Amino acid sequence: MIRGMVKFSGYSLISSFTPFHSVIVKNHRRLSLNKCFKNSNNSRSISTYTQKDTLHIKEEMVAERYLPPWFSVAPMMDWTDHHYRTLARLISKHAWLYTEMLAAETIVYQKDNLDRFLAFSPEQHPIVLQIGGNNLENIAKATELANPYGYDEINFNCGCPSPKVAGHGCFGVSLMLDPKFVGEAMSVIAANTDVPVSVKCRIGVDNRDSYNELCDFIYKVSSLSPTRHFIIHSRKALLNGISPAENRSIPPLKYEYYYALLRDFPDLTFTLNGGITTVDEVNTARREGAHSVMLGRAAYHNPWYTLGHVDTEIYGAPSNGLTRRQVLEQYQVYGDAILGRYGNNKPTVRDLMKPLLHFFHTEPGNGPFKRKADTAFQHCTTVKSFLDETLVAIPDYVLDSTVKEPPSGRENLFADVHNLLPPPYDAREPVVLYA
């Protein structure tokens, strides 16, 4: 069903894609910043001047290589794995991609098997590793172990409301209640990586949801650490009585909190997350002043029409002219190269095809394609055989058309947001500032 491989001018992610076993899994393209300051008596306790210089150097090193993170795909457990990110990068060249959250303990305890958790193909840049945890020693070790893989930023999870994470795990969004620890964790992460660091959080937790309390968290973390980038999910989290899915819909969105942060912390960078579902809405948020925007489930459940417009509509790049068939041709090369790479038949055909189950969202043939997929999972042993068996359900005109006009967004999503801003933050408690 899939016909000859195609190369594209300026966009040959998989047409020039090497088999996964020969992909560089530990990227040493950067000069270690510790080496830059090797004359210091202690590279982890360098002078005030050097610490500030280090932060600027890290940011400039990344900024020189990629366009700004005006659009990013949120870290999502069990979803934004290597396979999804490969598909996403085939569709969008400039979207910033995030890994699933990896617990620091997992990285530390799997130190002899790190490629399975941390390796990624070079084409996935720009890419951010998200880690979670509540033990400073493990957070430090995990960051140090991840550093050779060459991620472009390290993000710390302070926003996940899952009971396994925020409840039993005592990290995720529950850490918003302890900004001092988060500041210490961010300092530890920054000391063990060569790239910028960031925090992803909610606007509050349970009844700790006032704007001033959110500002206290931002102020303390940014004062106690080199953190200059915060990703703000514009809902609070409720830790008792509702599920993670309900935590994405029941607490009301308060975009006015996000825009107030831009006013009250002009020296910091904020990414807006939560409730935004189209590229049109991303641009609306940015016209209202948002520094950048992160989408989650919309980018997973409708990757073609969401990611397919990122480069042109947000970054102003020319269309790459790709069709779904061409994307699938390239993804097949990747999939069959990595199939069974990690033993125990992992990843499986099912693992590799999971991101493609939403590839034909709302298109003719989508239902029959999914039914054929259910059958094909029972016996197909290669990605090629799976696609040969299932794509007969999709009309050729769907496979061979480029991405259509972007879907329009809700016009009133940010209506009157600037008139709803809370009073300016002025209750800054004295803290020992990060040098």
Image: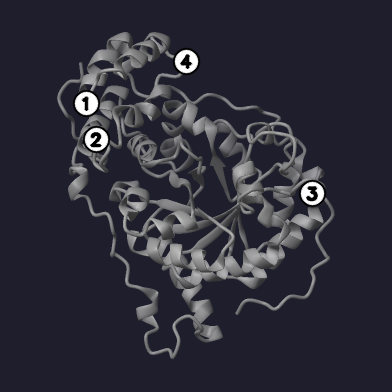
- Residue with the mark numbered 4: 362
Disc 2 from disc 3: Cα separation:
46 Å
Looking at the rendered structure, the kind of residue marked 2 is Leu
Q: Earlier in the sequence, mark 1 or mark 4?
A: 4
Disc 4 from disc 3: Cα separation:
38 Å
Q: Is residue 79 left or right of residue 114?
A: right
Question: Foreground: 219 or 60?
Answer: 219
- Residue with the mark numbered 2: 339
Secondary element type, mark 4: loop
Disc 1 from disc 3: Cα separation:
50 Å
**Mark linked to residue 382:** 1
**Viewport quadrant of the N terminus:** top left
Q: Is residue 289 visible?
A: no
Secondary element type, mark 2: loop
| Crowding near the residue tagged with mark 4, few <14, some 14–19, many ≥20 C-alpha atoms within 10 Å | few
Marks 4 and 3 close (CB-CB < 8 Å): no
Q: Based on the displayed image, in which of its 4 quarters is residue 250 positioned?
A: top right
* Residue 300 drawn at (x, y percent): 47, 31
* Residue 61 drawn at (x, y percent): 40, 66
Q: Earlier in the sequence, mark 4 or mark 3?
A: 3
| Crowding near the residue tagged with mark 2, few <14, some 14–19, many ≥20 C-alpha atoms within 10 Å | many
**Mark linked to residue 209:** 3
